Image (cartoon, rainbow, N blue to C red):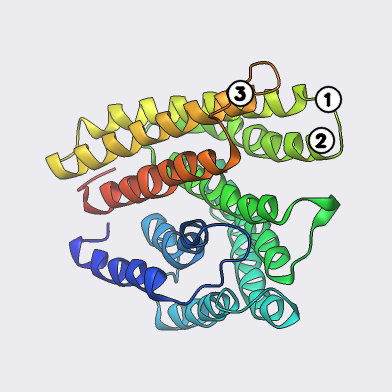
Amino acid sequence: MPNHKTLWPKLLVAALLFAAPIQTQWAEPFVYQILLAGPLLFVPWGIQLLLLKGSESRTGVLLYLIPATLLLTAYCLPSGYLAAGLAIPWLIWVSGIAWTVLRQSQPGTLAMKLAFVFLPVAAAWMFADRLGWQPLGFDPLIVLLTGVHFHYAGFALALVTALLPDEKWKKRLSLGLLPGVAGVAAGITSTQLSGPPWIEIIGVTIMVLVASVLAIRQIAFARNQNLSSSVLLSLGALALLAGMTLALLYGWRFEHQWPWLSMPFMYASHGVLNSLGFSLLSFTGYTIGPSR
């Protein structure tokens, strides 16, 4: 288990995200900072938490730093061919990680495998964002937020599920992750193509149910940890519950209209709760916790 000293590099990365001259073309700066916190902070942190073989070797660090630095540079440039080209190495790197995890001989939990499968999907949407490409006619903001979605509702949620010590609940939640995360994406795509709204409603509802049970199980696990870890894990779980409540309300907007529940409100509240709330607090809680 990583110790307290490993938190310092993560704080430096967080400071770098605020200092970098990121080009904010489709949304407010903090949305881009949340997006980039995924690959630059939570992905290497998550690999370290799961203690994957070779994750802490010098070669592994170097192979990570090169595509990560190029990706950050891509977001310091306007969208276009150059920015998209700089995002490609990251897409290749996470695809290689996903392939390695899927084909490793030792059995891994479904949640762990899903966490790394979601990363190439997130990277593909980041590539589309840097290219200025709008698949299926999606608004550039939706392209940007889809990259955010697969880092947090995808990678981070699946990874924290994999960290749960209760194998029974870990398996049950893992079986709900794929239809939940993929269902939300399919529902949004269906809505974009003028399909029936119930597809998005069902996808969001499954996602919220899985995340809510995970939050409850994380609070139960936190009771057996030291005080600092317990507080962080519990607060992270509460942030997840709050963020997913907003997601449920937004998903049901076709049946019930709430004027205040706009897209800017969602990425300012739901997005922050899932990233700085759930992901940051939970990852920190697992880092300083003595046992799993």
What amino acid does circle 3 point to? Thr
- Which residue has dot 2 on it? 190
Q: What residue is at 29 percent from the left and 48 percent from the top?
A: 286
Q: Quadrant of the N terminus?
A: bottom left
Badges 2 and 1: C-beta atoms under 8 Å apart? yes
Which circle's residue, 3 or 1, is located before the other in the chain?
A: 1
- Which residue has dot 3 on it? 205
- Which residue has dot 1 on it? 196
Q: Residues within 10 Å of mark 2 (few under 14, many from 20)?
A: some
Is residue 140 shown left or right of residue 162? Answer: right
User: Where does residue 189 sit, x and y in percent of width and height?
Assistant: 78, 40
Badges 2 and 3: C-beta atoms under 8 Å apart? no
Q: CA distance from mark 2 to mark 1?
A: 7 Å
What amino acid does circle 2 point to? Ser
Q: Is residue 89 above or below residue 190?
A: below
User: Where does residue 26 sit, x and y in percent of width and height?
Assistant: 63, 60
Between label 3 and label 1, give the one nearer the viewer. 1
